[in-house]
Image: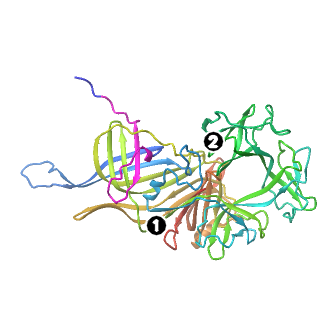
Amino acid sequence: MSLPTPRLNRKRFVLVKQEGTIGTDSSPTSANGIYLESLTVKKMETKAIDRNSIRPFLGSGGKIISSYEGSIEMEIALAIGGDANGVPTPGTVPAWDVLMTGCGVAQYASTQAISGNAAAGTSNTLTLEAGSSSTNDIFCGTSVLVSLASNTCASGTADKLSFTLATADTSLVENDELVGGIARLTHTSGTLPAQPGVTVMNKQVILQVVANYINKTMDLTGCFLRVTTGSKTDIRKIASKSGLTVTLDKKLSALPTSSSTYSLIEERKIKSSTVATKVIELTTALQFAAATTTLYSIPERRLIINYDGSTKIATVGKPFSKTITTGIPYVINPFVRYYPISTAFKTNTIYYYEDGALHTFTGAMGTFTMDFSTGQLPTAKFTYTGIVDRYEDASLPTYDVSKWVEPVPVNFENTKDLIIGDYANTVTDKISFDAGNEVVHTNCPGFEAVYIKDRAVKGSVGIWAPKQSEMDFYELVKTGRKTVFAFTHGPIGNQIALFAQSVQLSNPSDSEKDGVQMLSLDLSMVPTSDGGDWQMVLQ
């Protein structure tokens, strides 16, 4: 007799697809694969009736199963939506969209960038153009980029530590008003030469020789390359260079061709700015001295925390370096927004494959938590309940997670803009979020279904404890006053922002990490209207 073949726990895969009709198998395929970090499955959880029959002897009377359900816990790493090759693409719904919409969450996608010139502004507001959206808070959680100055340099210095704004540039009003901001200098632009076979993960580009800037021996590491191919434009950092071929730190949205245009860019932090001389001093030297042909811009990005659809005024979480005036250009990248709903819920069909077998669940709904811990990948853990549909022998499907974008770790470089009320200089160690859905399975005569009966959204945050003069969190807890909570993770182009406009803080507690005094706070999201609990924006 032959021995049985072991079924390996490592060989597992999950497919999830939204149902057109609640409770009807939507037949997921390989394209609906979920890229999992962890997986826990309870294939059948039963409710039973104990038989305590009266008999003339001792012993159990057995059980009768009255109802059963399946549950599955899926943990994923968070990143924005991508194209067919997993290249981050703002405005594209992520591959995990189906997991969100099965948790009582709706989605809105803005596939085009929103740009214009400010109609007015202050140090912390920007009035968008008259034709902008009239929907309140539709831009909350998005990052807006403004160009505080742009022109061609009047000159640069030999030490490469400063440049002078154009004579006609009147954007600088006060000394040092741009300190801490970023100066972006474009040294040279052109059209790429033929790109024979340079397609390695969309990360390599062949450049052409340009006097004073590009040749086979010149080191361009650390510079940025802006590449436009068709409708796709990316700015990527040059990680290395061999001859005229540069390797970028991240994939391009489209393979470059001989008709693609490019620009060679450097970015530096601003140390000082002087009105009288229009000199911008940088904290570190450029690789190429600014010249009269060098284009400069002073871009500044801020997180929008309030938007009035009637006045078109967007309020940002941290003041701009200078007062926004009429005519300053702005851009809001394409984005995808998620927010909770109370009606029109969606359900999913889940196929769980384990080596040689298939378990399916229909009518599945769930809840989720998110975790942003220092030094780890940002994750979301979805817990679904579904109706047990079938169990059968089946081969594993094709493993296809090609659209899933690589996440970036939680650290100083990637995780920014933590805002709690009026405190925008927050240093954090950990942020957690709980969608708080109460998911129930009912099985009674005439009706069997899984549904969300209520939700109570909550979270927690651990921060460096501020002084009372910086922010009095204890007073905020005592008064119960609702405030804003927001943060961003990842660079624009692969950024996740979580935003809540009406948050109560509670249970302040002290701790220590690496010798630093920490303050932990519980968060309760209290909506004033349907969907006002929270918003998550991918941009």
Sequence-first tag of 2 and 1: 2
> Can you name the residue that lies furthest to the top here?
1
User: Does dot 2 land on a helix, a strand or a loop?
Assistant: loop
Q: Residues within 10 Å of mark 1 (few under 14, many from 20)?
A: some
Q: Nearer the viewer, mark 2 or mark 1?
A: 2
**Location of residue 421 in the rendering, given as x and y in whole percent from the top left corner:** 64, 67
Image location (x, y in percent) of residue 41: 37, 46
* Amino acid type assigned to the residue bearing label 1 in the image: Ile
Q: Quadrant of residue 431?
A: bottom right
Q: Where does label 2 land, which residue?
A: 255
Q: Which residue has dot 1 on it?
A: 341
Which range is magenta? 5-33
Which residue is at a point 79% across and 35% down the rendered structure image? 219
Quarter that holds the N terminus? top left
The secondary structure that dominates the magenta segment is loop
Q: Is residue 509 visible?
A: no
**Magenta segment: does it hold 63?**
no
Find out whether residue 8 is within the magenta segment.
yes
Return the x and y of residue 193 as percentages of the image width and height: 73, 38
- The residue at the point 80 percent across, 50 percent down is 185
Q: Amino acid at mark 2?
A: Leu
Provide residue 303's location: percent of width, then percent of height: 66, 62
Residue at the extreme left: 56
Q: Is residue 37 left or right of residue 417?
A: left
